[in-house]
Amino acid sequence: MLNDFTWNMTGYIPKHQVNPHGDGIIPYVAERIFQLEPEPPSVGNLNEYILSALHEKNLLHFSFFLHHYEPQLNKRIKSFLGVDGGDLYDTDRFLDIKLSCREQMLQKLMDYDPAKGAEYATYIFPFIRDAMLRFRMGEEKWSVSSLTNYKMVRSMAWLYHNTKDAVNEFSKKYNCDLALAEEYLKVVRGIRNQQPFYVTDEDGEETGEDVALEPPLIS
């Protein structure tokens, strides 16, 4: 449990002031909120920070990891914002998503098992994607019962636009009956009257396709 950890940042301060002029956080700073001063101690591999955090139960080392991982996280968030129909220059939203990702990374730190062979940065990759999807799920006007269902709706949306028979393809993909697939198709069609809805492809990557539009004709 995180309650067993300390987060002792003695000797380190944020490298950039969050609100130096009282005008809100500028994009340059928003992309560098995890940067520390002085520079964290060097390690041969970023995973050493995570192993130290787990061994010493001190999240100072997690902050060291974030210091170096931040550019990669920024890139993922910008890619997400670039296809979800949001404002690329909305700094507040960028930060909200970023902090949601950090919270997910913290929670999943407890489940990380180095003995399984994957480095933490690899292990956390799908959970960061889930954090961004969960954030957007909370913003949208329609709702579902879980992130799993949310992903399934998006999968149906992709099939609806890209296959001749979305119901059958969905049924095969999730090994479910046709009636359940029909229910997901009804949800997708209902969304069209509410707001733009950007879908993921079958590998979970964003396509930028808006299901508010009619699906293309497939002969």
Image (cartoon, rainbow, N blue to C red):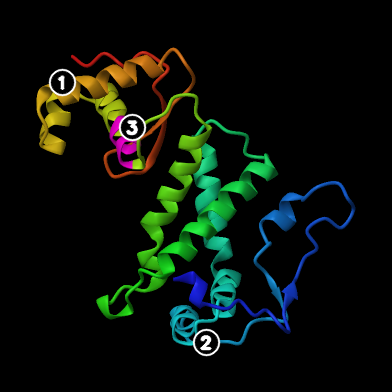
Q: Between disc 2 and disc 3, whose residue precedes?
A: 2
Q: Amino acid at mark 1?
A: Asp
Q: Is residue 196 left or right of residue 64?
A: left
Mark yes or no: residue 52 visible: yes
Q: Which residue is mark 1?
A: 165
What crowding class fits label 3: few (fewer than 14 Cα within 10 Å), some (14-19), or many (20 or more)?
many
Q: Nearer the viewer, residue 120 or 137?
A: 137
Q: Is residue 190 left or right of residue 116?
A: right
Circle 1 sits in a helix, a strand or a loop, which is it? loop
Give the number of the disc on residue 154.
3
For the residues bearing labels 1 and 2, Cβ distance under 8 angstroms? no
Q: Between disc 1 and disc 2, whose residue precedes?
A: 2
User: Is 1 situated above or below 93?
Assistant: below
Question: In the image, is residue 149 part of the stretch drawn in magenta?
Answer: yes
What percent of the width, then of the height, locates residue 55? 44, 86
Label 1 or label 3, whichever lies nearer to me, is 3
Q: Which residue is mark 2?
A: 43
Give residue 216's quadrant in the image. top left
Separation of marks 1 and 3 at Cα, in angstroms: 16 Å
Q: Residue at x 52, y 61 (%)?
A: 72
Tell me which segment is drawn in magenta. 148-153
